[in-house]
Amino acid sequence: MTSILTNVAAMAALQTLRGIDDKMETTQARVSSGLRVGGAADNAAYWSIATTMRSDNMALAAVSDALGLGAAKVDTAYAAMESAVNVVKEIKAKLVAASEEGVDKTKIQQEIKQLQDQLKSISEAASFSGENWLQVDLGANAATEITKSVVGSFVRDSDGNVSVKKVSYTLGTNTVLFDEGADPATGFGAGILDKSHNINGNGVTLTVNVDGTSQNYNIVKYTTEEVIGYGGTFDSGGEVAVGGSGAAAYVKVGDDTWVAAVDQSSVTQQEVAVVGDDAVTAWAVDLTQLATADMEASVAGFKIDRNTTPDQIAGLVSMIDKTLEAIISASADLGSIAMRINLQEEFVTALSDSIDSGIGRLVDADMNEESTRLKALQTQQQLAIQSLSIANTASENILTLFRQ
């Protein structure tokens, strides 16, 4: 049936043209944006995943920045540690030179003082972004240690829970050079360079328990010959020499080394520490024979002069050598954490690239395919327009039926 009121052919052609126009609009949007999934309406699942992963990738970018900041802190501390190692080596060399007879020790002390000041300058300058890992207040934390951390990664598990992982470094008595909480009266602290050491210059070091607290003392020693010279006799264990009536008593604290003793029963526990027993009397160290002040030293605070004995210098050299080992160990720790941070930086960069690639596979448009589709749709559009034009002209042909 032919009708001049309803043109079915034109309606069909128009509907086809509208469908082609919709497809062209979608294709043009993909070509212009480069995205196959530009919004939730395109593909809700893919759009949701891509949006979440883009957010995580932004977090990884922040992690990368944090790793750079952490690497700078570690590199600063490591460079300062290396400088400190070289300075301590110089101090050790000066002390070895001071052990030579005839050397002016006061001149050497002037050089050592400059090197000690340099150690303090190195430690003070090892600061980045307001943080100094070589100079910390350990006064109240010497036993607990302080943990510094650098953001290392951003993790999302299968349940959608997120967490930030960190690379940690411990600041303590074996990693900090100077303790800002050092005793102002003595200068001794818990750091590697201001830690107190007993320098055994004219005696031996003895650990005694005074009122429940163990303390290190340098003792005025006596040899076996001196003890026997006083008329002392040994107990059955050979550890205590007891003199006659009114004579001095001694306890053994080392190979052929003795220290004056008193009868524990005659003094309070706060004044003595039991180190021997002759089966009759409990003998204790006579604390009046112990000295500490002039034998305590630290790498950053010791001094030598003309009266410094060879034994004392030998003790100082031993102290420097042990301290050097501690600094080298701390430097190795910093070097290892610097290596770990560098590896983590490389991993985060590779991970970020992988995430970008994964997002692209989900939502990016195939431009070759889209350009081909666009060309085909343009052709279909032209044909649809032509079909609509033919359908519209069909009703005009009815006029010929009424012409005479």
Image (cartoon, rainbow, N blue to C red):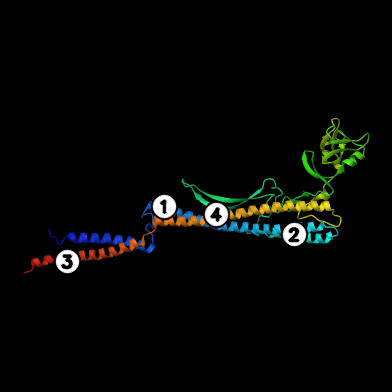
Is any part of residue 16 visible from this angle? Answer: yes
Count of labels shown?
A: 4
Q: Amino acid at mark 1?
A: Ser
Q: At x 14% / y 66%, what residue is drawn?
A: 396
Q: Amino acid at mark 3?
A: Thr
Residue bearing the label numbered 2 = 90
Residue bearing the label numbered 3 = 393
Q: Amino acid at mark 2?
A: Glu
- Closer mark to the observer between disc 3 and disc 2: 2
Residue bearing the label numbered 1 = 48
Whether residue 230 is situated above or below residue 64 in the rendered picture: above
Label 3, secondary structure: give it: helix
Q: Considering depth in this image, is 243 or 126 the residue closer to the camera?
A: 243
Query: Mark 2 or mark 4, which is nearer the start of the sequence?
Result: 2
The quarter of the image holding the N terminus is bottom left
Q: CA distance from mark 4 to mark 3?
A: 73 Å
Label 4, secondary structure: give it: helix
Q: At x 89% / y 40%, what residue is drawn?
A: 227
Label 2, secondary structure: give it: helix
Residue bearing the label numbered 4 = 344
